[in-house]
Amino acid sequence: MNEELAGYLQQIEAVKREAETFLTGLTDAQFNWRPGPDRWSIAQCFDHLNVSVRKTIPAFDRAIAAARARGRLAPGPFRYGWFARWMVGSMEPPVKRRQGTFKILLPAQEVPLAPTLAEFRMVRDQLAERVRSADGLDLKRARVISPVSRLLRLPLGAYFAFVVAHDRRHLWQAANVRAAPDFTHRGS
């Protein structure tokens, strides 16, 4: 497996471990507590991440299948253009500016912790399967069409980086919710 893809697999596992550790000991009430009317709860951060990856998996599948069918193979390393690098960088924490969310990626208002965490693990495992299946492909020339807009197309490798950075962004956001002054009083 090329070094870039191996790095994404390590990052996916790190995100799963961080989520597991972060959510240990939380109650459903704490998980769903919102620090303000226009702010997301920890639950909404995780549900949004689950919805986002669930909606993106078919786009990865199409891009991988198309690249294989066209024989777009290359060993790497790959260098992505400024737009792809900017997109990935815009997701990395700490967040410099808030962004709106596309309607198809909006989280539920409330979700239970245990099944949400189980889904988080499951969809990250599915993402890791896609990373493994992309081995040998030209990660720069293979393109993923975003589920939010057909106009948004990123190289396959950059889209993997984008998704993992997006995970880190919302884990950071969830940590800020947990650090809010009123959070500790929401234990029951």
Image (cartoon, rainbow, N blue to C red):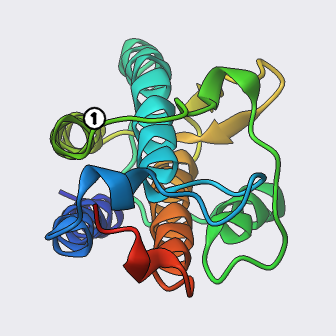
Q: Position of residue 62 (x, y in %)?
A: 45, 15
At x 34%, y 53%, the residue is 29
Q: Is residue 184 above or below residue 159?
A: below
Q: Which SS class for mark 1?
A: helix
Quadrant containing the C terminus is bottom left
Q: Image check: 78 left or right of 104?
A: left
Question: Is the N terminus in the top left, top right, bottom left or bottom right quadrant?
Answer: bottom left
Residue 147 in sight: no
Amino acid carrying label 1: it is Arg
Residue shown at the point (58%, 30%) measured from the top left: 144
Mark 1, residue position: 130
As drawn, 176 above or below 73: below
Relative to the observer, which residue lies in front, 154 or 87? 87
The image quarter in which residue 54 lies: top left
Query: Which residue occupies the foreground of this view, 86 or 49?
Result: 49
Q: Is residue 3 left or right of residue 173?
A: left
Looking at the image, which residue is at 55% across and 33% down? 109
- The part of the image, by quadrant, that contains residue 40 is bottom right
Above or below 41: residue 86: below
Please give the count of numbered marks on the rendered protein.
1
Q: Position of residue 59 (x, y in %)?
A: 50, 21
Measured as percent of width and height from the top left, residue 154 is found at 67, 40
How many residues crowd mark 1 within 10 Å: few (<14), some (14–19), many (20+)?
A: some
Say if residue 5 shows up in the picture: yes
Q: Residue at x 58, y 58 (%)?
A: 34
Task: Give above or below for 29 relative to 18.
Answer: above
Q: Would residue 179 appear left or right of 23 to someone viewing this image?
A: right
Judge by depth and name the residue closer to the eye, 160 or 169.
Answer: 169
